[in-house]
Amino acid sequence: MRAFIRRHRKKLLVGLVVLTLLVATPPIAAAVYAWRDDRLARMTTEGPYRATRESLNAHPVPDWFSDAKFGIFIHWGLFSVPGFAPTGNYADVLRSDYDRAMLVHPYAEDYGNAMRDPSTPTAEHHRATYGNLPYEGFKAMFDKGLERWDPNAWAKTFRDSGARYVVLVAKYHDGYALWPTGVRHPHRPGWHSERDIVGELATAVRAQGLRFGVYYSGGVDWTFQRDIVRTLGDYTYARYGDGYADYADAQLRELVIRYKPDLLWNDISWPTGQKRLFSLLADYYNTVPDGVVNDRWQTDSFWRWTMGTTLGRAGFDRLMKWAIADDPEFIDNVTPPAVPHSDFTTPEYTQYDTVRAKKWETTRGIGNSYGFNRMERDQDYASFPDTLLPDFVDAVAKNGNLLLNVGPSGGEGTLPPEQLRRLAGFGRWLDANGAAIYASRPWSRPESEGAHFTLGRDGAVNVILGGPVTGDRVRLAGVQLTGTARLLGDDSPVALTVEGPDTVLTFARPPAPDALKPAIRITPG
């Protein structure tokens, strides 16, 4: 052995050096990558929160957010002028046409990306309707429509729907800011509204007694990321572009300072490292102590940079296609990955099956698009009695909120009648049954054979029935309840009888046969 080592010492030494470099290079590169961003981290506030995971995770979820249950999401911007996308279902497109999914899916807010590929339905529509108009040309049309926009009318509509908070998309993937930002755009100066849409809506919403939040597209900005987005790999791991991390950090800080939003709703990912993000979030909590942040803050890293290579994105796409082929329903239940800190999680167009200890918020459009899609008809929108209301009640019973999106048209911000009808449905139902929803918490069990349960702060158990009541009696299987019960819709008494493992409800005045999910409040004693 010694003789062998002496004879091959140089080769062995070279091999050892190569092996050491192979093993050591990735962690060294990752450390250098992180250091370049970490050195820019700094806080600008004094207060109880510091830029550490422990400090941020000590932030309590405020009661207002846990109590609110129902919020309105607003996707509105330049894409609302053309308001076009193919109809259908996003998950179905991923299953049937993965390699072009981000170009042909039904989200009309992605018009600016889809129109760049001349073979897409969006590009065909654009040529036929607008000729050679660039996407930037919609700015003048949007501004003209803004002359007729009434933020106070919006705010009243949202209050009447029973919503308790509103989240406006302040900047979507097209990079267009809905406020007169003072942060200079290095590639597209003036790419923002001159009218303070964010500020005006914040004032109007708060005047109605609602909370106000902002959405910011931290992970995607096509004014920095110039390549056409075709696949989920392109979408999730697009390179951020030079200067984007500083730009996004400055813009979000500007939003916090100017408008003090009650929610920070970031999307996709975040372009800085964790240390800079923690500084931003600590400054936010010191500025808005009872604010909340969502969970879509996957930070930049050397690993993400690697995934952004052509090989990395191709590998991700191959894996996704394999997963979908193996289980076509897999894509229906994807939720954002866990991050070191968030106040609530955000499953999209899906829900959790059980009560979650951590607060959560399911988000969805009323239809299959978030932005206004003029191609959608009433049948393309979710049914209020069959989908929207049942999913809302199910979420609340399991410690969730519903953030329901509206997509106004054009710069004038007209809410489509199909959406208004469904908002009015929420308003009517919550006006009658809101005492079983607002300020409630999960009970010991969330549901039983279609009925859902919530717990009031006073210890009252709320029973939200699953279907219409026929006759004057309803049996709750496997649930034993005692106390004084009243029907929330008209405050009429309901008698409780325990029969073995079940409870029978007998109504003095039964709900109308067409009453949707009537609720009964049972106070102990």
Image (cartoon, rainbow, N blue to C red):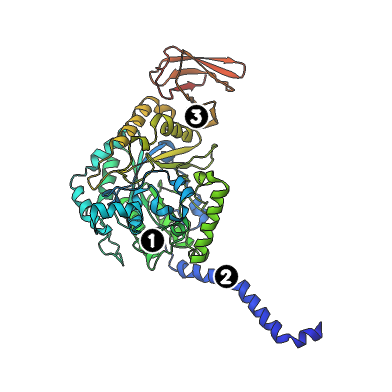
Q: Is residue 521 above or below residue 290?
A: above
Which residue matches tag 2? 26
Q: Is residue 258 visible?
A: no
Residue occupying image coordinates x 61% and y 73%: 24
Q: Which mark is first along the chain, 3 or 1?
A: 1
Asked if marks 2 and 3 touch (Cβ < 8 Å), the reply is: no
Q: Which mark is first along the chain, 1 or 2?
A: 2
Locate residue 492: give its quadrant: top left
Kindly give the residue lying farthest to the bottom in the view shown: 7
Q: Please indicate whether residue 55 sits to the left or right of residue 252 in the image.
A: right
How far across and how far down the image is residue 181, in percent? 28, 58
Query: At label 2, which amino acid type do we have?
Result: Pro
Q: Please indicate whether residue 153 sits to the left or right of residue 12 in the image.
A: left
Which residue matches tag 1? 228
- Disc 2 to disc 1, C-alpha distance: 29 Å
Asked if marks 1 and 3 touch (Cβ < 8 Å), the reply is: no
In the foreground, 255 or 13? 13
Quarter of the picture holding the N terminus: bottom right
Disc 3 is placed on an element classified as: strand
Q: Say few, some or many: other residues with alpha carbon within 10 Å of mark 2 (under 14 / 14 to 19 / 20 or more).
A: few
Query: At label 3, which amino acid type do we have?
Result: Leu
- Disc 2 to disc 3, C-alpha distance: 51 Å
Q: Nearer the viewer, mark 1 or mark 3?
A: 1
Which residue matches tag 3? 455
Q: Nearer the viewer, mark 2 or mark 1?
A: 1
How far across and how far down the image is residue 385, in percent? 40, 29
How far across and how far down the image is residue 49, in percent? 45, 54
In the foreground, 305 or 184? 305
Disc 1 is placed on an element classified as: loop
Q: Say few, some or many: other residues with alpha carbon within 10 Å of mark 1 (under 14 / 14 to 19 / 20 or more).
A: some
Residue occupying image coordinates x 29% and y 46%: 202
Asked if marks 2 and 1 touch (Cβ < 8 Å), the reply is: no
